[in-house]
Image (tube, rainbow, N blue to C red):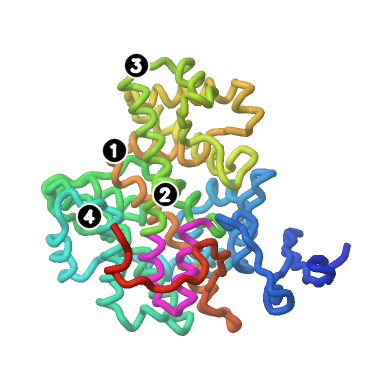
Amino acid sequence: MSDRATLSYAGQDYELPVIVGTEDERAVSIEKLRADSGLITLDDGYANTGSCISNITFIDGERGILRYRGYPIEELAEHSTFIETAYLIIFGELPTEKQLGEFRNLLAEHMFIHEAMRHHFEGFPPNAPPMAILSAMINTLGCFEPVLTQPEQDNRFIEAAARLISKVRTVAAAAYKKSIGDPIIYPRFDLGYTANFLHMMFCKPNKVCRPDAAVERALDQIFILHADHEQNCSTSTVRMVGSSQANLYASVAAGVCALWGPLHGGANVAVINMLESIRASGESIPDFVARIKDKKAHARLMGFGHRVYKNYDPRARLIKQSCDQVLSRQGIQDPLLEIALQLEEVALKDPYFIERKLYPNVDFYSGIIMRAAGVPLDMFTVLFAIGRLPGWIANWREVHLNPNARIYRPRQVYNGPTQRQYVPIAERGG
Protein backbone atom coordinates (compact mmCIF):
# COMPACT_ATOMS: atom_id res chain seq x y z
CA MET A 1 0.00 0.00 0.00
CA SER A 2 1.26 3.46 -0.89
CA ASP A 3 2.64 5.57 1.94
CA ARG A 4 1.42 8.75 0.27
CA ALA A 5 -1.97 10.17 -0.68
CA THR A 6 -2.61 12.56 -3.56
CA LEU A 7 -4.84 15.62 -3.41
CA SER A 8 -5.84 17.16 -6.74
CA TYR A 9 -6.85 20.81 -6.74
CA ALA A 10 -6.98 23.44 -9.48
CA GLY A 11 -5.16 21.20 -11.94
CA GLN A 12 -2.29 20.40 -9.61
CA ASP A 13 -1.51 17.31 -7.55
CA TYR A 14 -0.19 17.48 -4.00
CA GLU A 15 1.39 14.44 -2.41
CA LEU A 16 0.65 14.01 1.28
CA PRO A 17 2.48 11.54 3.56
CA VAL A 18 0.43 8.75 5.16
CA ILE A 19 1.33 8.12 8.80
CA VAL A 20 0.77 4.55 10.05
CA GLY A 21 0.38 3.82 13.76
CA THR A 22 1.38 0.65 15.57
CA GLU A 23 -2.22 -0.63 15.36
CA ASP A 24 -2.31 0.10 11.61
CA GLU A 25 -4.32 3.29 12.00
CA ARG A 26 -3.67 5.53 9.01
CA ALA A 27 -3.65 9.29 8.83
CA VAL A 28 -2.95 11.70 6.00
CA SER A 29 -0.44 14.29 7.19
CA ILE A 30 -1.42 17.80 6.08
CA GLU A 31 1.29 19.70 7.96
CA LYS A 32 2.59 21.29 4.74
CA LEU A 33 -0.73 21.49 2.87
CA ARG A 34 -1.37 25.19 3.45
CA ALA A 35 2.21 26.17 2.67
CA ASP A 36 2.17 24.16 -0.59
CA SER A 37 -1.38 24.75 -1.83
CA GLY A 38 -2.94 27.58 0.19
CA LEU A 39 -5.62 25.12 1.39
CA ILE A 40 -6.59 24.10 4.90
CA THR A 41 -8.89 21.26 5.92
CA LEU A 42 -12.26 21.86 7.59
CA ASP A 43 -13.50 19.30 10.11
CA ASP A 44 -16.11 20.84 12.39
CA GLY A 45 -15.81 19.20 15.82
CA TYR A 46 -12.52 17.46 14.86
CA ALA A 47 -14.33 14.14 14.33
CA ASN A 48 -11.85 13.06 11.64
CA THR A 49 -8.80 15.08 12.67
CA GLY A 50 -5.82 13.66 14.51
CA SER A 51 -4.37 16.41 16.68
CA CYS A 52 -1.29 14.49 17.80
CA ILE A 53 0.66 11.26 17.78
CA SER A 54 0.33 9.64 21.21
CA ASN A 55 1.65 6.52 22.92
CA ILE A 56 -0.91 6.40 25.72
CA THR A 57 -4.31 5.01 24.75
CA PHE A 58 -5.66 3.00 21.81
CA ILE A 59 -9.36 2.85 20.93
CA ASP A 60 -11.02 0.87 18.15
CA GLY A 61 -14.63 2.03 18.27
CA GLU A 62 -15.84 -0.40 15.62
CA ARG A 63 -14.56 -3.44 17.52
CA GLY A 64 -15.13 -2.10 21.03
CA ILE A 65 -11.46 -2.13 22.04
CA LEU A 66 -9.81 0.07 24.69
CA ARG A 67 -6.19 -0.38 25.78
CA TYR A 68 -3.94 1.66 28.07
CA ARG A 69 -0.30 1.48 26.91
CA GLY A 70 -1.20 -1.77 25.11
CA TYR A 71 -2.95 -3.45 28.04
CA PRO A 72 -6.63 -4.39 27.47
CA ILE A 73 -9.01 -2.52 29.74
CA GLU A 74 -10.65 -5.84 30.66
CA GLU A 75 -7.42 -7.15 32.20
CA LEU A 76 -6.67 -3.94 34.06
CA ALA A 77 -10.20 -3.68 35.45
CA GLU A 78 -10.07 -7.26 36.72
CA HIS A 79 -6.52 -7.49 38.04
CA SER A 80 -5.16 -3.98 38.59
CA THR A 81 -5.90 -1.11 40.95
CA PHE A 82 -6.45 2.53 40.12
CA ILE A 83 -3.04 3.55 41.48
CA GLU A 84 -1.20 0.85 39.54
CA THR A 85 -3.13 1.81 36.39
CA ALA A 86 -2.35 5.48 37.00
CA TYR A 87 1.37 4.67 37.17
CA LEU A 88 1.10 2.69 33.93
CA ILE A 89 -0.68 5.49 32.09
CA ILE A 90 1.68 8.22 33.27
CA PHE A 91 5.01 6.42 32.98
CA GLY A 92 4.33 3.87 30.24
CA GLU A 93 5.00 0.58 32.05
CA LEU A 94 3.41 -1.41 34.84
CA PRO A 95 5.39 -0.67 38.01
CA THR A 96 7.58 -3.16 39.80
CA GLU A 97 6.65 -3.96 43.38
CA LYS A 98 9.27 -1.46 44.55
CA GLN A 99 8.12 1.28 42.18
CA LEU A 100 4.48 0.80 43.18
CA GLY A 101 5.41 0.88 46.86
CA GLU A 102 7.37 4.11 46.41
CA PHE A 103 4.50 5.68 44.45
CA ARG A 104 2.00 4.73 47.14
CA ASN A 105 4.31 6.19 49.78
CA LEU A 106 4.38 9.46 47.86
CA LEU A 107 0.58 9.45 47.69
CA ALA A 108 0.36 8.87 51.44
CA GLU A 109 2.96 11.56 52.17
CA HIS A 110 1.13 14.19 50.12
CA MET A 111 -2.54 13.42 50.77
CA PHE A 112 -3.01 16.39 53.12
CA ILE A 113 -3.64 19.84 51.73
CA HIS A 114 -1.94 22.89 53.22
CA GLU A 115 -3.88 24.06 56.28
CA ALA A 116 -4.16 27.54 54.79
CA MET A 117 -6.15 26.07 51.90
CA ARG A 118 -8.91 25.06 54.30
CA HIS A 119 -9.81 28.74 54.60
CA HIS A 120 -10.20 29.05 50.84
CA PHE A 121 -13.29 26.87 51.00
CA GLU A 122 -14.94 29.55 53.14
CA GLY A 123 -14.89 31.91 50.15
CA PHE A 124 -17.32 29.76 48.17
CA PRO A 125 -21.07 29.95 48.78
CA PRO A 126 -22.62 26.74 50.17
CA ASN A 127 -24.31 25.98 46.84
CA ALA A 128 -21.16 26.47 44.73
CA PRO A 129 -20.79 23.72 42.09
CA PRO A 130 -18.13 21.25 43.25
CA MET A 131 -16.50 21.29 39.80
CA ALA A 132 -15.96 25.05 40.10
CA ILE A 133 -14.36 24.55 43.49
CA LEU A 134 -12.22 21.68 42.19
CA SER A 135 -10.85 23.71 39.28
CA ALA A 136 -10.12 26.73 41.45
CA MET A 137 -8.46 24.69 44.18
CA ILE A 138 -6.25 22.78 41.76
CA ASN A 139 -4.89 26.11 40.57
CA THR A 140 -4.48 27.09 44.21
CA LEU A 141 -2.45 23.92 44.87
CA GLY A 142 0.02 25.19 42.30
CA CYS A 143 0.48 28.39 44.30
CA PHE A 144 1.54 26.35 47.34
CA GLU A 145 3.92 24.15 45.32
CA PRO A 146 5.42 26.44 42.64
CA VAL A 147 8.59 24.40 42.19
CA LEU A 148 6.48 21.45 41.00
CA THR A 149 4.26 23.27 38.50
CA GLN A 150 6.83 22.71 35.72
CA PRO A 151 8.68 19.52 36.74
CA GLU A 152 11.69 19.16 34.47
CA GLN A 153 13.05 15.80 35.58
CA ASP A 154 11.41 12.43 36.20
CA ASN A 155 12.27 12.43 39.91
CA ARG A 156 10.46 15.74 40.31
CA PHE A 157 7.70 14.79 37.92
CA ILE A 158 6.70 11.68 39.85
CA GLU A 159 6.41 13.81 42.98
CA ALA A 160 4.29 16.37 41.13
CA ALA A 161 2.04 13.63 39.74
CA ALA A 162 1.69 11.96 43.14
CA ARG A 163 0.88 15.25 44.87
CA LEU A 164 -1.83 16.09 42.36
CA ILE A 165 -3.41 12.62 42.28
CA SER A 166 -3.36 12.37 46.06
CA LYS A 167 -4.57 15.86 46.92
CA VAL A 168 -7.37 16.01 44.34
CA ARG A 169 -9.47 13.51 46.30
CA THR A 170 -8.85 15.48 49.51
CA VAL A 171 -9.98 18.70 47.81
CA ALA A 172 -13.01 16.97 46.28
CA ALA A 173 -14.16 15.47 49.57
CA ALA A 174 -13.60 18.77 51.40
CA ALA A 175 -15.69 20.61 48.80
CA TYR A 176 -18.53 18.17 49.42
CA LYS A 177 -18.28 18.46 53.20
CA LYS A 178 -18.39 22.24 53.07
CA SER A 179 -21.42 22.15 50.76
CA ILE A 180 -23.45 20.23 53.37
CA GLY A 181 -22.07 22.10 56.37
CA ASP A 182 -20.09 19.17 57.78
CA PRO A 183 -16.54 19.40 59.18
CA ILE A 184 -13.77 18.57 56.75
CA ILE A 185 -12.40 15.08 57.38
CA TYR A 186 -8.67 14.37 57.31
CA PRO A 187 -7.35 11.38 55.32
CA ARG A 188 -6.03 8.30 57.11
CA PHE A 189 -2.70 6.55 56.61
CA ASP A 190 -4.21 3.10 57.13
CA LEU A 191 -6.58 3.34 54.15
CA GLY A 192 -5.89 2.92 50.45
CA TYR A 193 -6.59 5.54 47.80
CA THR A 194 -10.25 4.88 47.09
CA ALA A 195 -11.17 3.85 50.61
CA ASN A 196 -9.63 7.10 51.87
CA PHE A 197 -11.77 9.13 49.50
CA LEU A 198 -14.94 7.37 50.70
CA HIS A 199 -13.81 7.90 54.29
CA MET A 200 -13.37 11.65 53.72
CA MET A 201 -16.73 11.84 51.91
CA PHE A 202 -18.96 9.97 54.32
CA CYS A 203 -17.36 9.66 57.77
CA LYS A 204 -17.74 12.14 60.63
CA PRO A 205 -15.24 13.22 63.33
CA ASN A 206 -17.26 11.45 66.04
CA LYS A 207 -17.99 8.32 64.04
CA VAL A 208 -15.30 6.09 62.57
CA CYS A 209 -16.56 4.18 59.56
CA ARG A 210 -15.09 1.67 57.14
CA PRO A 211 -16.16 1.89 53.49
CA ASP A 212 -18.05 -1.12 52.15
CA ALA A 213 -15.63 -3.38 50.27
CA ALA A 214 -17.93 -3.85 47.27
CA VAL A 215 -18.50 -0.10 46.93
CA GLU A 216 -14.77 0.57 47.32
CA ARG A 217 -13.89 -1.93 44.59
CA ALA A 218 -16.64 -0.65 42.28
CA LEU A 219 -15.48 2.95 42.68
CA ASP A 220 -11.84 1.96 42.16
CA GLN A 221 -12.92 0.24 38.96
CA ILE A 222 -14.83 3.35 37.86
CA PHE A 223 -11.60 5.32 38.31
CA ILE A 224 -9.70 2.74 36.21
CA LEU A 225 -12.29 2.80 33.43
CA HIS A 226 -12.21 6.60 33.29
CA ALA A 227 -8.43 7.02 33.67
CA ASP A 228 -7.89 7.91 30.01
CA HIS A 229 -9.88 7.85 26.80
CA GLU A 230 -7.72 9.19 24.00
CA GLN A 231 -8.28 12.74 22.69
CA ASN A 232 -11.64 13.59 24.22
CA CYS A 233 -12.72 17.15 24.95
CA SER A 234 -11.04 17.54 28.34
CA THR A 235 -7.82 15.70 27.43
CA SER A 236 -7.50 17.75 24.25
CA THR A 237 -8.00 20.84 26.40
CA VAL A 238 -5.17 19.81 28.73
CA ARG A 239 -2.89 19.29 25.74
CA MET A 240 -3.99 22.58 24.17
CA VAL A 241 -3.31 24.56 27.35
CA GLY A 242 -0.08 22.64 28.03
CA SER A 243 1.18 23.41 24.52
CA SER A 244 1.49 27.06 25.56
CA GLN A 245 3.89 25.80 28.27
CA ALA A 246 1.27 26.49 30.91
CA ASN A 247 2.10 24.60 34.07
CA LEU A 248 0.70 21.20 35.05
CA TYR A 249 -1.79 22.57 37.58
CA ALA A 250 -3.19 25.23 35.25
CA SER A 251 -3.52 22.71 32.42
CA VAL A 252 -5.33 20.16 34.61
CA ALA A 253 -7.61 22.89 36.02
CA ALA A 254 -8.59 23.71 32.44
CA GLY A 255 -9.33 20.02 31.87
CA VAL A 256 -11.69 20.08 34.86
CA CYS A 257 -13.60 22.99 33.30
CA ALA A 258 -13.90 21.15 29.98
CA LEU A 259 -15.09 17.98 31.73
CA TRP A 260 -17.77 19.98 33.54
CA GLY A 261 -19.96 20.17 30.43
CA PRO A 262 -23.10 18.00 30.33
CA LEU A 263 -22.05 16.51 26.98
CA HIS A 264 -18.79 15.27 28.50
CA GLY A 265 -18.31 14.54 32.19
CA GLY A 266 -21.89 15.44 33.05
CA ALA A 267 -23.36 12.63 30.95
CA ASN A 268 -23.96 10.34 33.94
CA VAL A 269 -25.82 13.19 35.66
CA ALA A 270 -28.04 13.44 32.57
CA VAL A 271 -28.82 9.72 32.93
CA ILE A 272 -30.08 10.17 36.49
CA ASN A 273 -32.08 13.27 35.45
CA MET A 274 -33.69 11.22 32.66
CA LEU A 275 -34.62 8.44 35.07
CA GLU A 276 -35.98 10.99 37.56
CA SER A 277 -38.12 12.51 34.80
CA ILE A 278 -39.57 9.09 33.93
CA ARG A 279 -40.35 8.42 37.59
CA ALA A 280 -41.96 11.84 38.18
CA SER A 281 -44.17 11.55 35.11
CA GLY A 282 -45.29 8.00 35.88
CA GLU A 283 -44.60 7.07 32.27
CA SER A 284 -44.14 3.38 31.52
CA ILE A 285 -40.88 2.18 30.03
CA PRO A 286 -42.57 0.94 26.81
CA ASP A 287 -44.21 4.35 26.35
CA PHE A 288 -40.90 6.13 26.97
CA VAL A 289 -39.13 3.88 24.47
CA ALA A 290 -41.89 4.58 21.93
CA ARG A 291 -41.27 8.32 22.35
CA ILE A 292 -37.55 7.80 21.79
CA LYS A 293 -38.34 6.13 18.46
CA ASP A 294 -40.69 8.95 17.42
CA LYS A 295 -38.59 11.77 15.96
CA LYS A 296 -41.44 14.23 16.40
CA ALA A 297 -41.46 13.63 20.17
CA HIS A 298 -37.93 15.09 20.56
CA ALA A 299 -37.27 12.75 23.48
CA ARG A 300 -33.64 12.04 24.39
CA LEU A 301 -32.21 8.75 25.54
CA MET A 302 -29.23 9.36 27.80
CA GLY A 303 -26.55 6.78 28.61
CA PHE A 304 -26.90 4.84 25.36
CA GLY A 305 -24.55 5.00 22.36
CA HIS A 306 -21.17 6.72 22.17
CA ARG A 307 -19.38 9.17 19.86
CA VAL A 308 -16.47 6.76 19.37
CA TYR A 309 -17.85 3.27 20.02
CA LYS A 310 -20.00 1.75 17.28
CA ASN A 311 -20.06 -1.44 19.25
CA TYR A 312 -20.69 -2.19 22.93
CA ASP A 313 -18.59 0.16 25.06
CA PRO A 314 -16.07 -2.25 26.67
CA ARG A 315 -16.14 -0.18 29.84
CA ALA A 316 -19.91 -0.64 30.09
CA ARG A 317 -19.61 -4.43 30.10
CA LEU A 318 -17.21 -4.26 33.02
CA ILE A 319 -19.01 -1.66 35.05
CA LYS A 320 -22.34 -3.45 34.68
CA GLN A 321 -20.89 -6.41 36.56
CA SER A 322 -19.83 -4.11 39.40
CA CYS A 323 -23.22 -2.43 39.29
CA ASP A 324 -25.03 -5.74 39.74
CA GLN A 325 -22.72 -6.70 42.64
CA VAL A 326 -23.16 -3.40 44.46
CA LEU A 327 -26.95 -3.37 44.09
CA SER A 328 -27.19 -6.99 45.24
CA ARG A 329 -24.89 -6.47 48.22
CA GLN A 330 -26.51 -3.23 49.32
CA GLY A 331 -30.06 -4.57 48.97
CA ILE A 332 -31.11 -1.16 47.70
CA GLN A 333 -34.74 -0.42 46.86
CA ASP A 334 -34.48 2.73 44.75
CA PRO A 335 -37.21 3.52 42.19
CA LEU A 336 -34.68 5.14 39.85
CA LEU A 337 -32.52 2.04 39.89
CA GLU A 338 -35.53 -0.12 39.13
CA ILE A 339 -36.42 2.11 36.18
CA ALA A 340 -32.83 1.93 34.92
CA LEU A 341 -32.82 -1.86 35.01
CA GLN A 342 -36.16 -2.03 33.18
CA LEU A 343 -34.94 0.41 30.53
CA GLU A 344 -31.76 -1.57 30.04
CA GLU A 345 -33.70 -4.82 29.63
CA VAL A 346 -36.07 -3.36 27.03
CA ALA A 347 -33.38 -1.56 25.05
CA LEU A 348 -31.08 -4.57 24.78
CA LYS A 349 -33.86 -6.60 23.16
CA ASP A 350 -35.40 -3.94 20.91
CA PRO A 351 -34.37 -4.14 17.20
CA TYR A 352 -34.49 -0.32 16.97
CA PHE A 353 -31.61 0.00 19.45
CA ILE A 354 -29.75 -3.07 18.24
CA GLU A 355 -29.73 -1.91 14.58
CA ARG A 356 -28.48 1.54 15.58
CA LYS A 357 -25.90 0.06 17.99
CA LEU A 358 -27.39 2.04 20.86
CA TYR A 359 -25.98 -0.02 23.69
CA PRO A 360 -25.76 1.21 27.28
CA ASN A 361 -22.49 3.08 27.78
CA VAL A 362 -20.25 3.62 30.78
CA ASP A 363 -22.22 6.71 31.87
CA PHE A 364 -25.44 4.72 32.22
CA TYR A 365 -23.98 2.32 34.78
CA SER A 366 -21.56 4.65 36.58
CA GLY A 367 -24.39 6.95 37.60
CA ILE A 368 -26.35 4.02 39.00
CA ILE A 369 -23.37 2.79 41.05
CA MET A 370 -22.58 6.21 42.44
CA ARG A 371 -26.20 6.78 43.39
CA ALA A 372 -26.26 3.39 45.13
CA ALA A 373 -23.05 4.34 46.96
CA GLY A 374 -24.68 7.51 48.28
CA VAL A 375 -22.70 9.93 46.11
CA PRO A 376 -24.80 13.07 45.52
CA LEU A 377 -25.62 14.07 41.96
CA ASP A 378 -23.42 17.18 41.87
CA MET A 379 -20.38 15.08 42.82
CA PHE A 380 -20.70 12.63 39.91
CA THR A 381 -18.54 14.69 37.57
CA VAL A 382 -16.01 15.32 40.32
CA LEU A 383 -15.46 11.57 40.62
CA PHE A 384 -15.02 11.44 36.85
CA ALA A 385 -12.32 14.11 37.17
CA ILE A 386 -10.50 12.14 39.88
CA GLY A 387 -10.44 9.10 37.63
CA ARG A 388 -9.37 11.03 34.52
CA LEU A 389 -6.47 12.78 36.27
CA PRO A 390 -3.78 10.21 35.31
CA GLY A 391 -4.69 10.58 31.64
CA TRP A 392 -4.52 14.36 31.84
CA ILE A 393 -1.13 14.21 33.55
CA ALA A 394 0.22 11.70 31.01
CA ASN A 395 -0.95 13.79 28.06
CA TRP A 396 0.48 16.98 29.56
CA ARG A 397 3.80 15.16 30.02
CA GLU A 398 3.73 13.87 26.45
CA VAL A 399 3.36 17.43 25.15
CA HIS A 400 5.99 18.69 27.60
CA LEU A 401 8.59 16.07 26.56
CA ASN A 402 8.04 16.42 22.81
CA PRO A 403 11.17 18.15 21.42
CA ASN A 404 9.21 19.25 18.35
CA ALA A 405 6.18 20.54 20.25
CA ARG A 406 4.58 23.75 19.07
CA ILE A 407 1.73 25.74 20.55
CA TYR A 408 -1.61 24.39 19.31
CA ARG A 409 -3.17 26.84 16.90
CA PRO A 410 -6.07 25.55 14.76
CA ARG A 411 -7.15 27.42 11.64
CA GLN A 412 -10.67 28.42 10.61
CA VAL A 413 -12.71 29.24 7.54
CA TYR A 414 -13.98 32.80 7.97
CA ASN A 415 -17.59 33.36 6.90
CA GLY A 416 -18.33 36.83 8.28
CA PRO A 417 -18.69 40.21 6.54
CA THR A 418 -16.03 41.23 4.04
CA GLN A 419 -14.15 44.53 4.51
CA ARG A 420 -16.35 47.52 5.31
CA GLN A 421 -15.80 51.09 6.45
CA TYR A 422 -16.30 52.40 9.97
CA VAL A 423 -19.46 54.53 10.29
CA PRO A 424 -19.55 57.30 12.96
CA ILE A 425 -22.31 56.75 15.54
CA ALA A 426 -24.22 59.87 14.46
CA GLU A 427 -24.58 58.47 10.92
CA ARG A 428 -25.78 54.98 11.83
CA GLY A 429 -29.48 55.75 11.83
CA GLY A 430 -32.25 54.61 14.16
3D distance between C-alphas at marks 3 and 4: 35 Å
In the image, which residues are magenta? 232-256
3D distance between C-alphas at marks 1 and 4: 16 Å
Q: Tag 4 or tag 1, which sits nearer the N-term? A: 4
- Which residue is outermost to the right? 1
Q: Given this view, does label 2 or label 1 mark the residue nearer the observer?
A: 2
Q: Nearer the viewer, residue 335 or 286?
A: 286
Q: Tag 3 or tag 1, which sits nearer the N-term? A: 3
Name the residue located 41 percent from the left edge and 62 percent from the top edge: 255
| Residue holding disc 4 | 175
Circle 4 packing at 10 Å, graded few (<14), some (14-19), many (20+), is many
Whether residue 252 is in magenta: the answer is: yes
Q: Position of residue 14 (x, y in %)?
A: 80, 72
Amino acid on which the number 3 mark rests in the picture = Gly
Q: Are marks 3 and 4 in contact (CB under 8 Å)?
A: no
3D distance between C-alphas at marks 2 and 1: 19 Å
Q: Given this view, does label 3 or label 4 mark the residue nearer the observer?
A: 3
Amino acid on which the number 2 mark rests in the picture = Gly
Circle 1 packing at 10 Å, graded few (<14), some (14-19), many (20+), is few
Q: Nearer the viewer, residue 416 or 217?
A: 416
Residue 272 visible, this angle: yes
Task: Write down the quadrant of residue 333 in the picture.
Answer: top left
Amino acid on which the number 1 mark rests in the picture = Gly
Q: Considering the numbered disc 3 on the image, is that residue within a helix, a strand or a loop?
A: loop
| Residue holding disc 2 | 265
